[in-house]
Amino acid sequence: MTNSSSDPLANAVPVSASTQFPDVYAFTVDVEEWFQVGAFENTIKRSDWRALESRVEEQTYKVLGLLDHCGVKASFFCLGWVAARYPLLINAIHNAGHEVGCHGMDHERLFRFSREEFIADVFKAKALLEDAIGVEVKGYRAPSFSLTPEVWWVYEVLEQAGFSYSSSLYPLKTDHYGMPDAPRRPFWPIGEGRILEAPMTVCKMLGRSLPGSGGGYFRLLPYALGHHLLSAGAKQNRAPGIFYMHPWEVDPDQPYRDDAPLLSRFRHYTGQAALPKKLERLCAAHKWMRLREAIVAPAYQSLEARG
């Protein structure tokens, strides 16, 4: 059992300074429906999901086509909810050479779960994904980067479920998520060699920690600034930069919710039409790998080399 002291990082161990990470970036995609996003959680009831237009297949195939055009292999963290309804989509992601990871069952934030509820959620989602692709799923990303100090036991459950890594922490603070005290480089959160955490990329600029991993920030900011935050953050952290996006971000034809708060609508809808070209430009600027190859494998290999 992990130390349950007030400091969740008490048992955390950084990856060895001798770890040889490749000079690459990791492209990641969080696969969920447009109506399952955190921005709409107070606007759209979960009980209404079944009645809403599903667009995740069309959106995800668009992302797959873009990545194929750019010659990029990525890590797709998929909801069990999507896998239950579209197993052939999950299989198509796998068959295209991308990594399939787990994003939980239905995008519920982790701090709303009891331990028993989370066990049921993650084991079910993992099983659905593995049924769709026929191989073991080893990577996990928390919905809305909601792995907080209060639920640090999540790592123990992930280890129990057979995951080898998580990419669930954003080492900064926003109004929506973040853990500013978390390490910026990959680390072992509950003890060396147990399960690896690959935190999202943060860039220090003018004394502040700024988000470098993309997402809505890359879509909303000018390309030059978004690209700089990612590349400068990777150099500062001495580890491959992690970029992430969602399939709904490349779909300007999705339903418009004028009943959502103005800020939520701005965050969700702005820049969708322009994003594919920005992504192509970003893909051309760097060499990319799946997250398990860019960060996870080197961390475990370094551990094994040290005996």
Image (cartoon, rainbow, N blue to C red):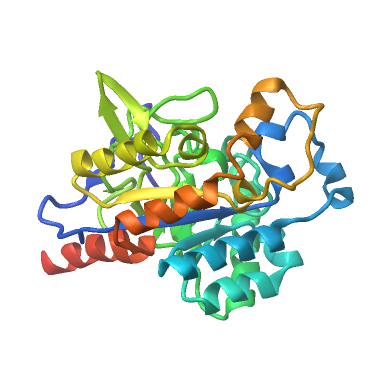
Please tell me which residue lies in front, 110 or 106: 106
Number of marks drawn? 0
Q: In which quarter of the image is the C terminus?
A: bottom left
Left/right of residue 227 with respect to residue 141 in the rendered view: left
The location of residue 259, given as percent across then percent down, is: 82, 26
Please tell me which residue lies in front, 144 or 156: 144
Residue farthest along the top direction in this orientation: 207
Which residue does the image show at 65% across and 46% down from the upper left? 107
Which residue does the image show at 74% across and 48% down from the upper left? 253
The location of residue 51, given as percent across then percent down, is: 89, 49
Residue farthest along the right direction in this orientation: 51
Which residue does the image show at 64% across and 28% down from the upper left? 266
Left/right of residue 3 with respect to residue 77 in the rendered view: left
The location of residue 190, given as percent across then percent down, is: 34, 47
Residue 195 appears in the rendering: no
Residue 165 appears in the rendering: yes
Please tell me which residue lies in front, 7 or 89: 89
Residue 164 higher or lower than 3, as above or below:
below
Residue 114 position by quadrant: top right
The location of residue 241, given as percent across then percent down, is: 31, 48
Residue 241 higher or lower than 44, as above or below:
below
Left/right of residue 179 with respect to residue 250 in the rendered view: left
